[in-house]
Amino acid sequence: MRKIIVCTFLTLDGVMQAPGGPDEDTGSGFEHGGWQKPVSDDEVGAAIAGWYDVSDAMLLGRKTYEIFASYWPTADPANPFTERMNSMQKYVASRTLTSLEWQNSTLLEGDVTEAVRALKESEGGNINVVGSGDLAQTLMRDGLVDEYRLTIHPVIIGSGKRLFADGAIPTALEPVSVTATKGGTVVGVYRPSGKPGYDSY
């Protein structure tokens, strides 16, 4: 069975909104877009590249799809990510899009939870959920996330969309690997392992 892997860049206070640029996502008046690059380093880039070595498809929400589709088709071909992003299969969850122009993109039909369950049972490699916060939260609520691959950067933003927002399902996580880069970013891979335990001292 294919795994659904949530791949997300986070600030230390858990914000995932608009890491890539000031105009990436200004929803709800967000003014901190582009926070990732100043606190990134080569080791972070290598870790992100590794996320795509274990998967052969992406699962995207509408907003992230539109951001990617406006950038990657005309991105610098010398960038090692360009060919990879364009050639990967993209599955898109949207209630408003009716057609997709970016190559190798497929619009999921019907209920997103059922569509993703069918994807997990189909032939192929693992599937990365990149960005797509609303979609990721839906998948978490429905128990469809098999793994988290997170970069947690040394910066506090104070506001913005969070991956683990209020109302997240309490979940215990098994750490698969956790390392820190020279710039202070924590690169963590975690797998859900049931409900949290509770105890006292």
Image (spheres, helix red, strand yellow):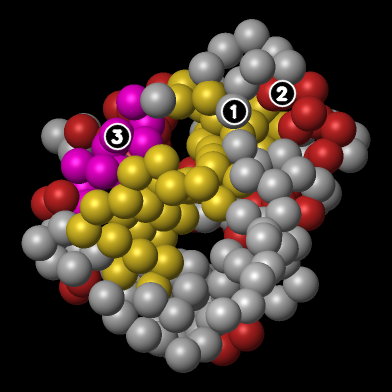
The quadrant in which residue 184 appears is bottom left
At label 2, the amino acid type is: Leu
- Distance in Å between CA atoms under marks 2 and 1: 9 Å
**Compared to 22, does 74 lie above or below?**
above
Q: Secondary structure at mark 2?
A: helix
Dot 2 alpha-carbon crowd within 10 angstroms: few under 14, some 14 to 19, many 20 or more = many
Q: Secondary structure at mark 1?
A: loop
Q: Which range is magenta?
A: 44-53
At label 1, the amino acid type is: Lys
User: Which residue is painted at 62% across and 85% down in the image?
Assistant: 28
In the displayed structure image, the side of residue 87 where residue 186 appears, left or right: left
Q: The C terminus is located in which quarter?
A: bottom right
Q: From the top left corner, tell me how far across and down residue 183 is, in percent.
A: 13, 66
Dot 3 alpha-carbon crowd within 10 angstroms: few under 14, some 14 to 19, many 20 or more = few
The residue lying toward the viewer, choosing from 135 and 91, is 135
User: Which residue is painted at 16% across and 58% down in the image?
Assistant: 181
Residue at numbered disc 3: 50
**Compared to 31, does 56 lie above or below?**
above
User: Which residue is painted at 24% across and 52% down in the image?
Assistant: 179
**Compared to 152, does 66 lie above or below?**
above
Of discs 2 and 1, which sits in the foreground? 1
Q: Residue lying farthest right?
A: 110
Visible residue check, residue 93? no
Residue at numbered disc 2: 119
* Residue 3 marker: 1
Q: Secondary structure at mark 3?
A: helix
Q: From the top left corner, tell me how far across and down residue 92 is, in percent.
A: 66, 38
